[in-house]
Amino acid sequence: MNLIVIGPAGSGKSTFVKSFLSFLKDDYDVKAVNLDPASDPIYEAHADVRKFVRTEDIMKKFNLGINGALIKSMDLALNYVDKLIWRGDYVLYDTPGQMELFLYLKSGTEIAKRIAESDWTVGLFIVDSEVASTPENFISILAQNAVISLRTGIPTITVFNKSDVVEVPFTPSSVRDVLRKEEGVLAELLEKLVDFLEFTTVRYRMIKISAVKGDGFDDVLSMINEVFCSCGDLS
């Protein structure tokens, strides 16, 4: 199964990939692929886009700033996608910290599509638990997950990282009760948005982890396997 790890910069994606690799390797054939042309992996990568495209080299060659070079790097990376797709019980694909590169560029979504065509594929949306400290932010995170699923065409699970530092104070059901007590157009809009989110990954139970400590990894593995299995508890 392919696991495409997506999330904003600083959410702990690479740390999760490194720790989850260690968690899985004793029982499974597991591999990791770095899809970030701007950063060297902090784990042993079986395939690395930086062997073909390096953002710092693109900046010099095309006289581009960092943002333009990142976009050009992803466009060029598409030419090597066949060399970046691996097979294994689980293959983790670590994506760029600027997740908009992967979600809103044609090249990024095409890479995701090509990966998904190679085997069963699940997205893992890694977010910092501290960001979800308000009802507005919590719902925004779930909405981002829905966008990821729509853009990539793959089922995506929201994984709240750094739970050893900050506890997410909401659940999809409890946040609705909180919003009903608030006044104003924003609260009304957010409450209605919860209804929409119930058709996305809200149907999956919340996953809370610590990538540093390895807490919650059993839940991640269980949820991954349940995505395509009607026998699991998805509520």
Image (tube, rainbow, N blue to C red):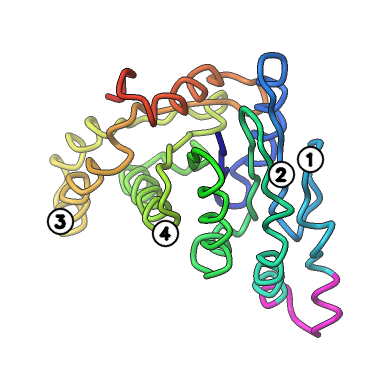
Mark 3–mark 2 Cα distance, whole angstroms, equals 46 Å
Please identify the quadrant where the C terminus is shown: top left
Q: Which residue is mark 2?
A: 33
Magenta-highlighted residues: 57-68
Q: Of the residues under marks 3 and 1, which one precedes in the sequence?
A: 1
Mark 4–mark 1 Cα distance, whole angstroms, equals 26 Å
Mark 4–mark 3 Cα distance, whole angstroms, equals 31 Å
Q: State which quadrant residue 147 falls in.
A: bottom left
Q: Main secondary structure of the magenta part?
A: helix
Q: State which quadrant residue 2 falls in.
A: top right
The residue that appears at 64% across and 44% down in the rendered structure is 93
Mark 1–mark 2 Cα distance, whole angstroms, equals 6 Å
Q: Of the residues under marks 1 and 2, which one precedes in the sequence?
A: 2
Is 183 placed left or right of 133 in the picture? left
Q: Of the residues under marks 4 and 3, which one precedes in the sequence?
A: 4
**Residue 126: horizontal and vertical position, in percent?**
53, 40
